[in-house]
Every structure is written in C-alpha cells, then in structure tokens.
Amino acid sequence: MAPRWVTVTWATKKCSSAACKRLEWERRLTVFFRPLDAEPIAYRASHRATRYALQASGVDKAGIVAKLARCLADHRVNVAQMQTQSRPEPESGTPIYTVRMVMDVPGEVDAQALRERLDVVARELCIDLVMEPA
C-alpha cells in the first residue's frame, strides 16, 4: 500500500494539538508531531530489506507485543503492518491472542538468527510463532 500524503493546514495543526492534549490528559499518552525535512525514503529500499510475515498466538497476557517488538527493534526490523485479535477459545472460553505482522528485515540482518531469537521469546511467552517470507 502506498503512503498517503496529507497537506497540513493551520486548522489541522490546531486540531491535532488539541487532540494531543486530550490524549495526554485522558490516556496519559504523549504524542509529538514534527515536520519531515524532505520526502521520506521507503525503508525497504534504503535498507535493502526483505519482507517477512510473522504470526504469533497464545493465551492472552500482558507483554506479548512488547517483547516481540523489543526483539524486532534489537534487530532493526521495521514493522510495516500489524493486526491483533483476542478471542475466546471455543471450548474453554480462554482468551487467545493473535498478532500478525508484516515486517521488513534489513539485508545485513541474519534472518535465521532473528528467527532463532524470536523462537526464544515465543518459548518464554508460551506462544506459537511462525515467521516466513511474505
């Protein structure tokens, strides 16, 4: 999917500022906007990256996305898309969490080493994980 460019007007900036303040107040989130110096360069092109798909699922618990994201960040992987879902298991009602990611792995990163590190994280979290070229 190609990125969409939006022209930011004064009214949009003011509205965005108000929305950011509301997020900070209601959700205790901090959001920063900064203008780009030039047209962005696609991550895949600038890092000779290969696209991979990752799917992980297991009993829903805090920290699944955080630990996967930390591992990916340590390997300088760019997450291009992410979808999550939590649904009850049909028989027991136990919540099962599934995360699907499309990611760009830089050319200088050893994909096998990344896969092995993700397997370690999956074992720690007791989740099933599959990573394959997209």
Image: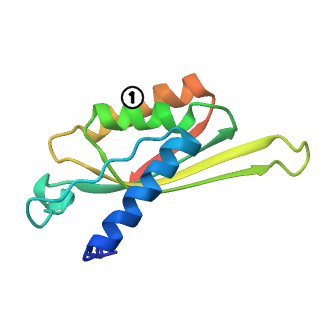
Q: Quadrant of the N terminus?
A: bottom left
Query: Is residue 134 visible in this depiction of the protein?
Result: no
Q: Please tell me which residue is depicted at 8% across the width and 64% down the height of the picture.
A: 38
Is the residue 8 above or below the residue 44 in the image?
below
Q: Is residue 52 left or right of residue 35?
A: right
Residue underneath mark 1: 117
**In what element is the residue under mark 1?**
helix
Q: Is residue 122 left or right of residue 4?
A: right
Image location (x, y in percent) of residue 116: 39, 31
Is the residue 16 above or below the residue 124 in the image?
below
Is the residue 94 above or below the residue 11 in the image?
above
Front in this rendered view, residue 50 or 71: 71
Q: Please tell me which residue is depicted at 32% across the width and 36% down the height of the picture.
A: 73
Image location (x, y in percent) of residue 113: 30, 32
Is the residue 102 above or below the residue 105 in the image?
below
What amino acid does circle 1 point to?
Answer: Arg
**Residue furthest to the left:** 38
State the image quarter where residue 111 is shown: top left
**Mark 1 Cα shell of 10 Å, populated few (<14), some (14-19), many (≥20):** some
**Residue furthest to the top:** 124
Colour scheme of this structure image? rainbow
State the image quarter where residue 58 is shown: top right
Q: Please tell me which residue is depicted at 52% across the width and 38% down the height of the picture.
A: 28
Q: Is residue 59 left or right of residue 92?
A: left
Q: Quadrant of the C terminus?
A: bottom left
